[in-house]
Image (cartoon, rainbow, N blue to C red):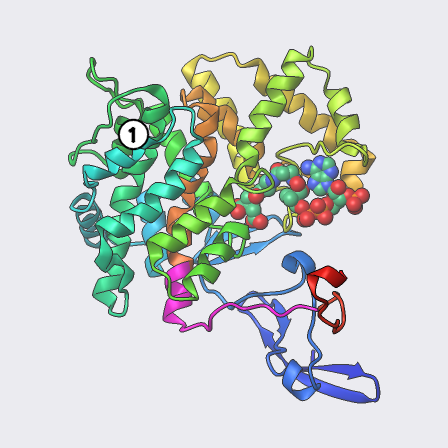
């Protein structure tokens, strides 16, 4: 393949350099287009064909169902690593040795206290406030209590901001859940691992000694790893574009949380469980919901199905489906919702509408079944997605700042009124 692209506009032809990635992806670098063509731009709703950056963090191949973080396959990481190791690899470029990991964890633990005044903010929320709204607000509020976190001009300042949010975010997640349950806002223990500590903060009851269930710990580790990054998805692109104005890390993460909340994105894991529950209440009539999903006049979509990039199985869904079965068996839970999910999946995989559009189960289709088995309330499912995605957002934001990327400011094609004469109100 030549290393240029040619573009003909009217009688003029233009050449643009091609960029080739380490996995042989090819992009046309059009950064000179508007200047050389007298103002012509491209347009691509939803950026289905447009790259926003070059990145060395995550590679995925939607056709082949491949996902790798820093070159490691998601299958290896889910099976052999723990979440903090994967977080370190995403943020700093490779898996840590024991000394690096221990220091990272120690620095996180030293930054895992949240100012008591944050509890006054939580108290101001109604008990039924959606935890994603609470989490986004609290993450932004953290700036007020850590004003120096906005400065990341030195490597040390960047590192300090990272360990602060890695330490405080799980506390906010636990407090957001405990607020809905009317439980005291607690802390974990420095003696525990990163994920065990999250479990203690989330699940501990004030009147009993909390014991870590290894089945749940392993499942949670795996789920957080599988959600940790996914290249330039909607919420990560939000974190990058907010950060490109040099807004601080915490403010950028708060924006990413809000983007993830949407039911077409991370909010789908909650919507999947609500859909499966509705089907169960409806006597398990999956065919009715399949018909609704295919009916263009019906806004209903089969939640947990389809993906902007994966036009084959989402490799995370494959891993989570097996884990869902194992966790329910190990915990001795019979959940009819799992059977309905399996039935729906089989129907969709054999339905011409879904096959033709390459709509397969995505990461959100089975994850909620595991969260439910862990005793996590359905409105907390997307918060768990955010907890997993935190290191990916941090890594992508850090890369954007280190690469000194310009402020994100897309162009548009104006389709409104041409110049109009102003009329006084009594003449309109
Ligand atoms: C995540 O991008 C990422 O990487 C995201 C994520 C991550 O890790 O960050 O992977 C996490 O967000 C997973 C996706 C979770 N969302 C859902 O499960 C919601 C249900 N899925 C859809 O809304 C949809 O599939 C999207 C939003 C995921 C993808 O939408 P696209 O790529 O814009 O595709 P589209 O809307 O253009 O759909 C193409 C066709 C349309 O039909 P036609 O117009 O061709 O006739 O497929 C149909 C759509 O109507 N379609 C569906 C469908 N998804 C697409 N029809 C029924 N049910 C669905 N779920």
Residue at the image position 44 percent from the left and 37 percent from the top: 132
Residue at the image position 61 percent from the left and 83 percent from the top: 32
- Residue nearer the viewer, 382 or 128: 128
Residue at the image position 39 percent from the left and 32 percent from the top: 220
Q: Does dot 1 land on a helix, a strand or a loop?
A: helix
Q: Main secondary structure of the magenta part?
A: loop
Residue 409 among those drawn in magenta? yes
* Image quadrant in which you'd find residue 175: top left
Does the numbered disc 1 mark a residue whose Cβ is under 8 Å from ligand 1? no
Residue 359 seen in render = no
| Image height of 390 relative to 156, above or below | above
Using residue 336 as the reference point, say whether residue 147 is left or right of it: left
- Count of labels in the image: 1
Residue position for label 1 = 123
| Image height of 375 relative to 298, above or below | above
Q: Where residue 123 sits: x, y (%)? A: 29, 29
- Residue nearer the viewer, 85 or 425: 425
For the record, the magenta segment spans 397-413
Using residue 205 as the reference point, say whether residue 259 is left or right of it: right
Q: Residues within 10 Å of mark 1 (few under 14, many from 20)?
A: few
| Image height of 111 relative to 202, above or below | below
Residue 341 among those drawn in magenta? no
| Image height of 142 relative to 188, above or below | below
Quadrant into which the C terminus falls: bottom right
Quadrant into which the N terminus falls: bottom right
* Image quadrant in which you'd find residue 383: top left
Using residue 88 as the reference point, say whether residue 19 is left or right of it: right
The quarter of the image that holds ligand 1 is top right
Q: Where residue 89 sits: x, y (%)? A: 35, 54
Residue 145 seen in render = yes
Q: Where residue 406 sits: x, y (%)? A: 46, 73
Residue at the image position 59 percent from the left and 79 percent from the top: 31
């Amino acid at each position: 393949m030549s290393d240029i692209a040619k573009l003909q506009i009217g009688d003029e032809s233009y050449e643009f350099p091609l960029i080739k990635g380490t996995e042989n992806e090819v992009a046309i670098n059009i950064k000179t287009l508007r200047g050389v063509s007298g103002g012509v731009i491209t347009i691509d709703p939803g950026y289905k064909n447009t790259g926003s950056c070059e990145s060395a963090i995550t590679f995925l191949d939607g056709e082949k169902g491949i996902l790798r973080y820093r070159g490691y396959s998601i299958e290896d990481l889910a099976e052999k690593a723990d979440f903090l190791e994967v977080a370190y690899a995403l943020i700093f470029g490779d898996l840590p040795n024991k000394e690096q990991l221990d220091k990272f964890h120690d620095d996180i633990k030293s930054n895992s206290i949240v100012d008591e005044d944050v509890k006054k903010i939580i108290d101001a929320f109604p008990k039924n406030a959606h935890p994603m709204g609470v989490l986004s607000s609290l993450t932004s509020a953290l700036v007020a209590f850590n004003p120096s976190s906005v400065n990341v001009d030195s490597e040390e300042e960047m590192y300090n901001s990272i360990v602060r949010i890695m330490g405080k975010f799980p506390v906010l997640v636990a407090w957001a859940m405990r607020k809905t349950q009317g439980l005291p806002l607690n802390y974990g223990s420095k003696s525990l691992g990163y994920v065990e500590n999250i479990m203690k903060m989330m699940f501990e009851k004030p009147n009993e000694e909390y014991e870590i269930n290894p089945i749940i710990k392993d499942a949670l580790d795996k789920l957080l790893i599988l959600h940790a990054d996914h290249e330039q998805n909607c919420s990560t692109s939000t974190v990058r574009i907010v950060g490109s104005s040099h807004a601080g890390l915490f403010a950028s993460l708060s924006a990413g949380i809000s983007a993830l909340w949407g039911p077409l994105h991370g909010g789908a894991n909650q919507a999947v469980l609500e859909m499966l529950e509705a089907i169960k209440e409806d006597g398990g009539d999956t065919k009715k919901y399949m018909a609704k999903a295919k009916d263009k006049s019906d806004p209903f979509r089969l939640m947990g199905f389809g993906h902007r990039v994966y036009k084959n199985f989402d490799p995370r869904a494959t891993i989570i489906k097996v884990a869902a079965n194992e966790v329910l068996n190990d915990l001795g839970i019979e959940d009819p919702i799992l059977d309905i999910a399996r039935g729906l999946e089989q129907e969709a995989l054999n339905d011409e509408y879904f096959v033709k559009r390459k709509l397969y189960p995505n990461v959100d289709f089975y994850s909620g079944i595991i969260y439910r088995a862990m005793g996590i309330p359905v409105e907390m499912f997307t918060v768990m997605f955010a907890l997993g995605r935190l290191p990916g957002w941090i890594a992508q934001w850090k890369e954007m700042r280190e690469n000194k990327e310009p402020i994100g400011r897309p162009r548009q094609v104006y389709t409104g009124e041409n110049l109009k004469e102003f009329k006084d109100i009594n003449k309109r």
